[in-house]
Image: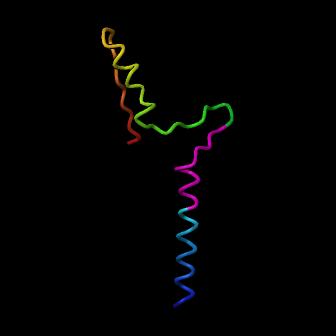
Amino acid sequence: MAKSKWLWGLVGLVVLALAWYFLWSAITPKGQPPLTRLTNDNLFVSQFNGAAPNVRMVLLLSPT
């Protein structure tokens, strides 16, 4: 029974490590700019609001 718990714990750690590597790390292929985490400071809100007299468009993309 104790061996089974250790095995499941090890499998869980491997899954978490792979998830971090593929989903949360900022590794990109060569030639591609690094990923940017969106925060309130870098959402381009001031540039968007500053262009109020012009036509603006928001494009929302979904992976599904």
Relative to 9, is 23 above or below? above
Looking at the figure, which quarter contains the C terminus?
A: top left
Q: Give the range drawn in magenta.
A: 17-29
Relative to 20, is 46 above or below? above
Relative to 63, is 53 above or below? above
The structure residue drawn at horizontal position 57% and vertical position 87%, both measured from the top left corner, is: 3
The colour scheme is rainbow
Q: Is residue 34 left or right of residue 59?
A: right
Residue 11, horizontal then vertical, whole percent: 56, 72
Would you say residue 11 sits in the magenta stretch? no
Secondary structure that dominates the magenta span? helix
The structure residue drawn at horizontal position 51% and vertical position 91%, both measured from the top left corner, is: 1
The structure residue drawn at horizontal position 34% and vertical position 16%, both measured from the top left corner, is: 56
Residue 18, horizontal then vertical, whole percent: 57, 58
Which of the 4 image quarters holds residue 28? top right
Q: Is residue 50 left or right of residue 27?
A: left
Question: Outermost residue toward the right?
Answer: 30
